[in-house]
Amino acid sequence: MGTATARGIGDASALVAREANTLAYIDGFWLCFWIAMVALFCVALITRAPRGHLPGAVWFCEKCAEEVRRGGVVEGMGVD
């Protein structure tokens, strides 16, 4: 095998490797795109929490907690 043939095989190998890397990057972008589409679809399914329902909230006074349970608004608590 001559030097020119070995160099030609090396160049062809480098070309194939470059194309394979390009296709791999494109596949990665497609994967990210579809994951983002699924995430946006899941976000679109999220609904509002029921009024007055704050799971895990810590209340510092029982009067405030009772007012919120009845659906009322406590001044200064930031509850809409």
Image (tube, rainbow, N blue to C red):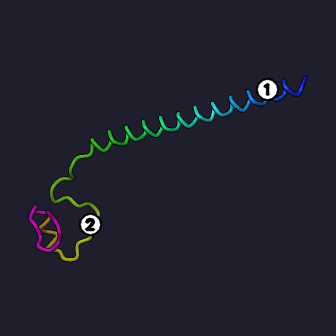
Q: Main secondary structure of the magenta part?
A: loop
Q: Position of residue 52 (x, y in %)?
A: 16, 60
Percent position (x, y) of residue 14? 72, 32
Name the disc covering residue 57, or none.
2
Give me the residue at 43% from left, 38% from top: 33
Q: CA distance from mark 2 to mark 1?
A: 68 Å
Q: Image quadrant for the N terminus?
A: top right
- Residue lying at 30% horizontally and 44% vertically, measured from the top left: 43
Kind of element beneath mark 1:
helix
Q: Amino acid at mark 1?
A: Ile
Image height of 54 relative to 36, above or below: below
Residue 20 percent location from the top left of the image: 63, 31
Closer to the camera, 17 or 43?
A: 17
Q: Which residue does the numbered mark 1 point to in the structure image?
A: 9
Residue 76 inside the magenta-drawn segment:
yes
Q: Quadrant of residue 7?
A: top right
Q: Is residue 55 magenta?
A: no
Q: Which residues are magenta?
A: 69-80
| In the image, farthest residue toward the right | 1
Disc 2 residue type? Answer: Ala
